[in-house]
Image (tube, helix red, strand yellow):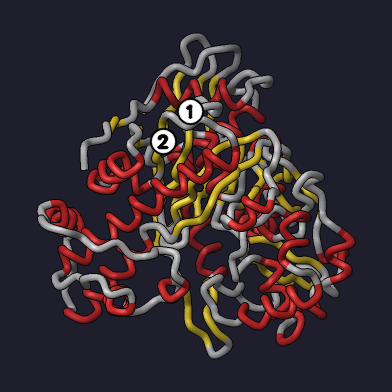
């Protein structure tokens, strides 16, 4: 995977730690900003990730994640002893609580049901209409401020002296530095939508302690060198530094969308489908609030104006359920081929219905939704898969149209990046339903964005390179697959 970088720079190597809701990776990024330039990625470690059910609820195994990350960084150093820096991205909203250097329990998983009481507690103090004007976030019941309201009543919050979101928590384990990176901090609901600083008044009204929220840093800022103990753990003779990237994985993924922001929409598709446009300023109108659109921080101060769609979680969890029932693995490409061959009418369901949030029997819940809404329920696994894909494509297309209307961006192209870009049926049906071309890829958008922000910070590409210059690197290194809309 290589292509032109252009501009002044030098050659160097960085490592991207990319943590997703089902798996994590450590990827070595080799960047050469000299002459024509080049960009290449090499995955040196991959490991599973997922929720752990404890007596207290659904949690993340942070201890296991740190073990896997340090092992992966050791592999990265064996491949490239001259590693210059490390950048960490992950999913949003979830956090760990620290007292001194001690972690007060494994972080809760956002799918844990404790947040229901937190939503009621927050809205009793600050109505959602006011919250939206302040933080610009769509309503999601697991946003950090709702989790913290539940934590305040039944958790360890009163004992903590710092709160760190997951990528910042991993960075703390590596460096000992306590910081909050802005793109991910914007998902807490506690940052001002325009100031991008902690909203101290809101924090106080919610009964939280401002002192637990750490100093904010931006993508490209240096977090610090690895501690001597951690450097020894991964076998580093020279300690690489941690650099802040777009630590919300979608913020990094959007960096690597090779788009013209003034006329394109993007879909970052994995466990979730993040569908939206990139803006210079937030949109906090009543219409945006009613459409449940969010204004999250992007790299270089951009705004990710988007809506969260349930995403490929619906398919992957259905497959897991079928495998659990049958005791046999399912060949996903074969299943999707069977789904593509399904003929006749296919039902479309509301992928954002809250019943689909929790793990378990999603096929049963999909059938239940269809019966309740008097539409035909799928019968076979292939029909279920086709129904899921059609429903996602329909949600993606509708969300792109809404984003265009609310933002004023005249969308003429949809860029679909991430793991979903490999799903040919989903890409084609999204193009068909949106009646717009879909450009699919790169698959590794999150890791690419992570690497490029580090590369710019390290001077491997021109230090004044803006997002458009970084995207030009991506456009030359990765040729997307184009899907033209077909008549339905």
Q: Quadrant of the C terminus?
A: top left
Which label sits on residue 45?
none
Whether residue 257 is situated above or below residue 110 in the rendered picture:
above
Which residue is labeled 1 in the image?
Answer: 259
Foreground residue, 430 or 155? 430
Residue 392 in picture, x, y percent from top left: 35, 55
Residue 425 in picture, x, y percent from top left: 23, 47
Evaluate if marks 1 and 2 touch, with contact meaning CB atoms under 8 Å apart. Answer: yes
Which residue is labeled 2 in the image?
Answer: 415
Residue 382 lies left or right of residue 375; in this view the side is left
Dot 2, how many residues are within 10 Å of its Cα: few (below 14), some (14-19), or many (20+)?
A: many
Which residue is painted at 54% across and 90% down in the image?
55
Foreground residue, 176 or 294? 294
Q: In which quarter of the image is residue 315?
A: bottom left
Which residue is painted at 29% across and 61% down in the image?
348
Which residue is painted at 70% across and 77% down in the image?
104
């Amino acid at each position: 995977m290589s292509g032109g970088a252009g501009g002044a720079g030098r050659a160097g190597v960085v490592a991207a730690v990319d943590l997703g809701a089902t798996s994590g990776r450590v990827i070595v990024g080799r960047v050469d900003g000299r002459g024509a330039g080049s960009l290449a990625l090499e995955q040196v470690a991959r490991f599973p990730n997922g929720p752990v059910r404890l007596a207290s609820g659904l949690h993340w195994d942070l201890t296991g994640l740190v073990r896997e990350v340090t092992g992966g960084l050791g592999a990265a150093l064996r491949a490239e002893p001259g590693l210059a820096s490390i950048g960490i991205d992950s999913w949003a909203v979830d956090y760990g609580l620290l007292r001194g250097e001690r972690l007060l329990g494994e972080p809760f998983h956002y799918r844990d049901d404790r947040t229901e009481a937190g939503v009621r507690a927050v809205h009793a103090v600050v109505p959602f209409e006011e919250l939206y004007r302040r933080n610009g976030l769509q309503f999601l019941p697991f946003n950090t401020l709702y989790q913290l309201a539940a934590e305040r009543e039944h958790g360890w919050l009163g004992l903590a002296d710092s709160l760190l979101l997951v990528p910042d928590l991993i960075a703390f384990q590596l460096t000992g530095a306590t910081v909050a990176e802005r793109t991910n901090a914007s998902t807490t609901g506690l940052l001002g939508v325009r100031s991008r600083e902690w909203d101290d008044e809101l924090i106080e009204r919610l009964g939280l302690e401002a002192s637990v929220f750490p100093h904010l840093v931006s993508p490209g800022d240096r977090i610090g060198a690895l501690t001597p103990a951690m450097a020894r753990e991964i076998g580093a003779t020279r300690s690489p530094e941690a650099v802040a990237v777009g630590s919300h994985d979608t913020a990094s993924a959007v960096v690597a969308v090779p788009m013209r922001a003034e006329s394109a929409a993007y879909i970052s598709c994995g466990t979730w489908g993040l569908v939206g446009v990139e803006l210079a300023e937030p949109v906090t109108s009543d219409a945006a609030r009613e459409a449940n659109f969010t204004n999250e921080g992007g790299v270089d101060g951009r705004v990710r104006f988007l809506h969260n769609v349930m995403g490929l979680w619906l398919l992957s969890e259905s497959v897991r359920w079928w495998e659990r029932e049958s005791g046999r693995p399912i060949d996903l490409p074969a299943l999707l081929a069977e789904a593509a061959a399904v003929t006749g009418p296919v039902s479309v369901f509301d992928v954002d219905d809250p019943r689909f949030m929790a793990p378990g029997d999603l096929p049963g819940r999909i059938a239940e939704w269809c019966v309740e809404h008097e539409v035909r329920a799928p019968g076979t696994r292939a029909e279920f898969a086709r129904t899921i894909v059609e429903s996602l494509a329909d949600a993606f297309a509708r969300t792109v149209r809404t984003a265009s209307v609310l933002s004023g961006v005249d969308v003429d192209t949809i860029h679909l990046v991430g793991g979903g870009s490999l799903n040919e049926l989903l890409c084609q049906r999204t193009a068909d339903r949106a009646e717009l071309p879909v450009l699919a890829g790169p698959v590794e958008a999150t890791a690419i964005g992570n690497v490029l922000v580090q590369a710019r910070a390290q001077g491997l590409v021109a230090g004044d390179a803006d997002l458009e210059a970084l995207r030009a690197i991506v456009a030359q290194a990765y040729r997307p697959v184009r899907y033209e809309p077909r008549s339905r």
